[in-house]
Image (tube, rainbow, N blue to C red):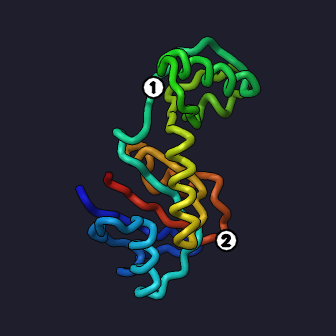
Amino acid sequence: SQSIHYLIASPNSLTLRPRDFGMLPRIQDESPFQSLRSQLQADGARVSRVVVLLSRAKVEMQTLSLPPASMAELPDLIRSSVEEQIGESEEENAIDFLLHESDVATDSSVEAKYAFSISKKRLEELNGLADESGFSLVALGVRHLAPIGVLKHGQLAENALSIAVHMYE
């Protein structure tokens, strides 16, 4: 699909207004962030922080089987496991992972279920495009794993206006 879907999430609001969500056509040779900025300005919406949800095809996703590990050990264990699965690459990757809530609650023996990676070059490109359009890219996610509930429980400041952007490339 050649469109940009967006939803503005405001922590203090209990309702969605028509300007809080929508779909824009992708304009060739224009950054999707710039298209979004233009639409938001036309609607009078003030948004500075952006959470981008990429399609599954744009993010490497691995299901991991790891030995139990402490939270402190987990990042290095996941990085080595992901690099082993991806294989040798000239490009460095940014790697993140998703834990089950029950794993986080115990903190003594954590087992990650999913790891995600994207090339650092692509991440820097997305950050640059967001910056050029006046947005701060605060997080990337995989679209099919990022319902609004996940966004609300994330590490987003309670007094900040945030926006979720679906980018179909």
Which residue is pictured at 39% across the width and 41% down the height?
58
Residue 87 lies, with reference to residue 53, above or below; the image says: above
Q: Earlier in the sequence, mark 2 or mark 1?
A: 1
Q: Which residue is mark 2?
A: 159
For the view shown, which residue lies furthest in the top direction?
67
Mark 2 crowd level (few <14, some 14–19, many ≥20, 10 Å Cα) = few
Say which amino acid is labelled 1.
Gln
Q: Is residue 114 left or right of residue 28?
A: right
Residue 93 lies, with reference to residue 26, above or below; the image says: above
- In the depicted view, which residue is nearer to us: 77 or 99? 77
Frontmost of labels 2 and 1 is 1
Q: What SS does tag 1 mark?
A: strand
- In the depicted view, which residue is nearer to us: 125 or 114? 125
- In the depicted view, which residue is nearer to us: 71 or 26? 26
Q: Which residue is mark 1?
A: 62
Which residue is pictured at 34% across the width and 66% down the height?
29
Residue 38 coordinates in the image, percent (x, y):
42, 80
Is residue 11 visible in the rendered image? The answer is: no
Which residue is pictured at 47% across the width and 70% down the height?
8
Residue 82 coordinates in the image, percent (x, y):
54, 22
Is residue 27 visible in the rendered image? The answer is: yes
Say which amino acid is labelled 2.
Asn
Residue 44 coordinates in the image, percent (x, y):
47, 87
